[in-house]
Amino acid sequence: MTYKYQHLMALTPNQLHNALMKRNAPPEMREQIKATITAQKAAQKSMRAKVIKVHAEWRPMLEGLRMERESLRSMRNYRSSGSRGQLVPNQEEITALDGYAMVLDRLHSEFELHKRNLVTPAVLARERGLPNKGIHWTDWIKDKFKERVHGLFGQVTPRTGAKVKQPFVRKTDPKSTEKLKARLHIRTLKEHGIAEQDYQLNPTERSKAKLEKMNEALRRIDRLSPTDPVPRTWSGLFTHEGETI
């Protein structure tokens, strides 16, 4: 993005004042330039914070998708080389792997586009009504594409001793899970503090119920295993129990 007075944006307030004084600009113009630069710096800071937030939201799904694409690429290269004493590659399996790769590549391009456009996965998942609120990359693939890929793998003749690829498995990376779990715990603790204060100031049945729900959410976060999907917010821990309070 191009800003007005771009060459002055990096200056401190004192440096900016001195630079404008050297120009002998009228006081009104100096103040106008200062106000413009101050507003632009605020907008720049806000945009930077938004970029960091949006990229952080997409990172877990992109990382999971990256791991699956790499696994698929390795399997594709291994199979097409005619390994395990098989002189002729299994063309049915190659076709299935290529079809699966095409779906994953398109999804990766879609994720990157949304990330560049600074749209969070939570917003898109809500708009599309995705299952599990779209917390895993597999939630973003339409059933018709999953069925086609499963159909391709269903036509593959099994090879003795060879690993059979299972597409669209909801794998999780333990390291990523721990990071997401820690972030969810911190965010929930902050909201819990607000809910607790609200109950103390306004002890209604509704505020009490919300506080109890959040107490349960904290317990569930502690019980999450390294392979469990981690929701973006504490309310996602109650996905299968109707609407949260």
Image (cartoon, rainbow, N blue to C red):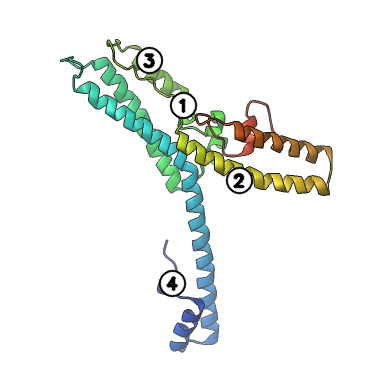
As drawn, is 177 to the left or to the right of 156? right
- Residue 10's tag is 4
How far apart in space, not on screen, are marks 3 and 1 (Cα)? 19 Å
Q: Identify the residue at horizontal 32%, vertical 24% (top origin).
A: 99
Q: Are marks 3 and 1 in contact (CB under 8 Å)?
A: no
Residue that extends furthest to the left in the rendered view of this protein: 87
Q: Closer to us: mark 2 or mark 4?
A: 2
Q: Is residue 30 above or below residue 3?
A: below
| Amino acid residing under circle 1 | Arg
How far apart in space, not on screen, are marks 2 and 4 (Cα)? 34 Å
Q: Closer to us: mark 2 or mark 3?
A: 2
Residue 30: % across, % down: 51, 82
Q: Identify the residue at horizontal 83%, vertical 37% (top origin).
A: 205
Say which residue label 1 marks. Answer: 170
Q: Is residue 160 above or below residue 102?
A: above
Q: Closer to us: mark 3 or mark 4?
A: 4
Image quadrant in which you'd find residue 219? top right
Q: Closer to us: mark 2 or mark 1?
A: 2
| Amino acid residing under circle 4 | Ala
How far apart in space, not on screen, are marks 2 and 3 (Cα)? 43 Å
As drawn, is 16 to the left or to the right of 104? right
Q: Identify the residue at horizontal 37%, vertical 20% (top origin).
A: 149
How far apart in space, not on screen, are marks 4 and 1 (Cα)? 46 Å
Residue 106 seen from this side: no
As drawn, is 46 to the left or to the right of 73? right
User: For numbered disc 3, what is the local secondary structure?
Assistant: helix
Residue 162 seen from this side: yes
